[in-house]
Amino acid sequence: MDMSMRHTLLGLFLLASAFSGNAQVKYLFESPTAILRPTRYELPIGGSVTLSCSVEGSGNWTILWYRAASFGSKEEPMTEYEGKNAIIVSQRGLYSCRGRSDSGRLTYNSDKAIIKDTLPITAIITIQPNWTQIYMGEAFTVRCEIPGGEGTSWSYDWRPERFTTYYTTNERTFYNVGWEDNGNYQCRGKTVLSLTEWSNIIPVTISFKLHPVLTVSPSWLSPGASVTLSCEIEYPSEGWSYYWYKAIPNMDIKEEPYKYELLPDGSETAQTLYIITGQTHTAAYVCRAQRGRNYYYTYYSKPKFVWSADLYSAASLTVGPVEQRLGYDFVRLTCTGNSTWWRVRKFPENSVPYCSDVWKLRESVCTLYTVISYSDDGVYWCESMSKQFSNAVNITLQDFYSGPLMVIPDDPVKKGTFVSLSCKLRIKKIFPSVAFYHNNKLIQNDSREELNFLAVSKSDEGSYKCQYSGKESPSRYMSVKSAVGPESSSFPVTARMKVVNAVAFILVMMLSMNQ
């Protein structure tokens, strides 16, 4: 072919390229591309996969197949599969295909299908520290081992799936864990075209930060007795160490009521028990636990107290006598000692409306009223800003309750009139049970605090008393006198006149409406 002919053909080709929208021209001058599916597949042990190849556009194409044993190696034709649109393979490798027309024209090669096989090796996953109950804020490490895989360059896949990424090291560490780190953890090793089987499963559970529970024994001190502290945690396991503290009154009212000082030899003990000897006064204690190489600490436990009833000159609580105010009983608690600031504390820590735990200057006074609908029973003690605890007093308000009062009219009541007697309780439960007696005979026993007579009679005269909360009122005598003259009716004259006037008014109104 001479040079002019070549230029002519080149011009035609360029012209055809300019009109590439013409399908026939594209068919004449552009090679189509073969399409191979699937492009990735992991063969199970003894498994196979079907590869299919197609050519875009129309025409009759003979499919040619190729395989490379690994990346970088030469592709070899698979002549035994020539002309087949789909083949079944069971070997790992890089597969591709292309089409050949009847005239010998070839398509572009397809993308390579990466087929990996599974080795008869099962990976092993381990966790450090060696526990699966993890608390928020802790750290843990998972490690993937390939038995017999020494000398092979492995990379690793991990589950849960949100963590599945290409990793070249066989360890993963999770710091400051949260809810998103819950899951079943697995791993497997892989090379370029081979995979191990997935490992065993390690179920990791993330829980709220731990609150240990401290118990003290005994709760009340006796001379010469030691005090045993016990720190308990949920889901106990190996690896915990314990810290022991003495609780000290906190002067900053904006913070927690106590701050903590480490006890002697109270750091990182392996035992869950701590024994205190020589304790003579009321005191409060706290514990917490720690584990792991990243030093995860639990919350502090709630303070627990050991109480002493012995008086202590530097700090003392006195319980005043029962007094009455507005007809109700109350008892006064007073803190005194070698400090200028005091507060009264109570266990259990339910709210006491008349007894605040705020700091008070020189002397702290707590007034407990017995006219309340819930119990203020409990252990009371004083605390000072100079870190002192007073003696403790176990108070049962029932012991200070002087009993109910029977309320009866002082003057004799008139026969036939309405009369109401009442029992003044002075201490009241949510569902009171009040008993009334007439001449020592029970006549009413329910939640009513009144004993009513619609029309009192001479037989109602006599001695009355009431009983409530195990205590009895003093007896009171009610006298009944006979009515004299027109007032003998059980309906008073004044009341009868009001009724007559009302009826007359109604009649006048009805007559005026009919006119």
Image: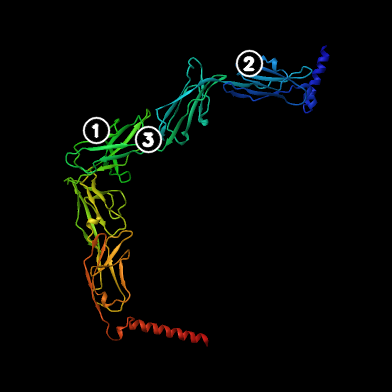
Q: Nearer the viewer, residue 89 or 33?
A: 89
Q: Is residue 369 above or below residue 21?
A: below
Q: Are marks 2 and 1 in contact (CB under 8 Å)?
A: no
Seen at 61% across and 24% down, the residue is 40
Residue designated by label 1? 264
Instruction: Measure the C-alpha gap from mark 2 to mark 3.
Output: 55 Å
Side of 424 relative to 179 (left or right): left
Residue designated by label 2? 68
Say how many tags the image has: 3
Instruction: Measure the C-alpha gap from mark 2 to mark 1.
Output: 72 Å
Side of 66 relative to 101 (left or right): left
Q: Position of residue 212 (x, y in %)?
A: 34, 38
Side of 78 relative to 276 (left or right): right
Seen at 36% across and 83% down, the residue is 496
- Amino acid at pointer 2: Ala
Q: Position of residue 200 (x, y in %)?
A: 48, 26
- Disc sitting over residue 235 in the figure: 3
Q: Is residue 120 above or below residue 444?
A: above
Please identify the residue farthest to the front as the structure is shown: 441
- Amino acid at pointer 1: Pro
